[in-house]
Amino acid sequence: MLGSLARWLRFLGYDTMYPGPSGDDDILRLAREEGRIIVTRDRGLAARAGPGAILLSSLVVDEQILQLRGAAGLDLDGPGRMMRCPK
C-alpha cells in the first residue's frame, strides 16, 4: 500500500521497514517489539495501533511525505538524506 513512500523515506535517511504482505497482528507485534511507528492508510490498523500509528489519507507520494512532515516532524533536509539503500 505504501511501498513507494517507504522507498522515499529510505532515500531521506529514515530507518524504514516495509513488511510486504503481512497480517495486521504481525505488523502490530513487529512495531511493538522494535519500537516502530506504523504509517498506514488502513483505518482499522491505525485504530488498533492507537498512538503508535500515523494514518495517511493521500494516495500521492508527495502528499504523503508532506502529511508525515506535519504529523511526525519529518525532516526533508536532514543529514541522512540520500544515504540509505531504497530496498
Image: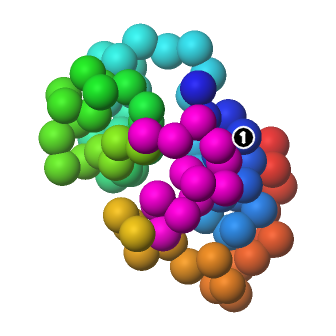
Q: Using residue 9 as the reference point, say whether residue 48 is left or right of it.
A: left
Question: Which quarter of the rendered picture does the N terminus lie within?
Answer: top right
Looking at the image, residue 40 lies above or below residue 82: above
Rendered location of residue 16, percent (x, y) = 59, 51
Q: Secondary structure at mark 1?
A: helix
Closer-to-camera residue (29/44)? 44
Q: Using residue 37 as the reference point, say whether residue 69 is left or right of it.
A: right
> Which residue is at a point 82% across and 71% down the rendered structure image?
82
Q: Using residue 25 as the reference point, say whether residue 49 is left or right of it.
A: left
Closer-to-camera residue (76/52)? 76
Rendered location of residue 66, percent (x, y) = 54, 64
Please report the bounds of the magenta region as a residue range. Answer: 57-69
Q: Which residue was labeled with disc 1?
A: 4
Is 46 one of the magenta-colored residues?
Answer: no
Q: How is the image coloured?
A: rainbow
> Which residue is at a point 29% across and 27% down the rendered structure image?
43
Rendered location of residue 40, percent (x, y) = 43, 36
> Which residue is at a point 47% across and 60% down the rendered structure image?
68
Q: Main secondary structure of the magenta part?
A: helix
Rendered location of residue 57, percent (x, y) = 43, 40
Quadrant hosting residue 23? top left
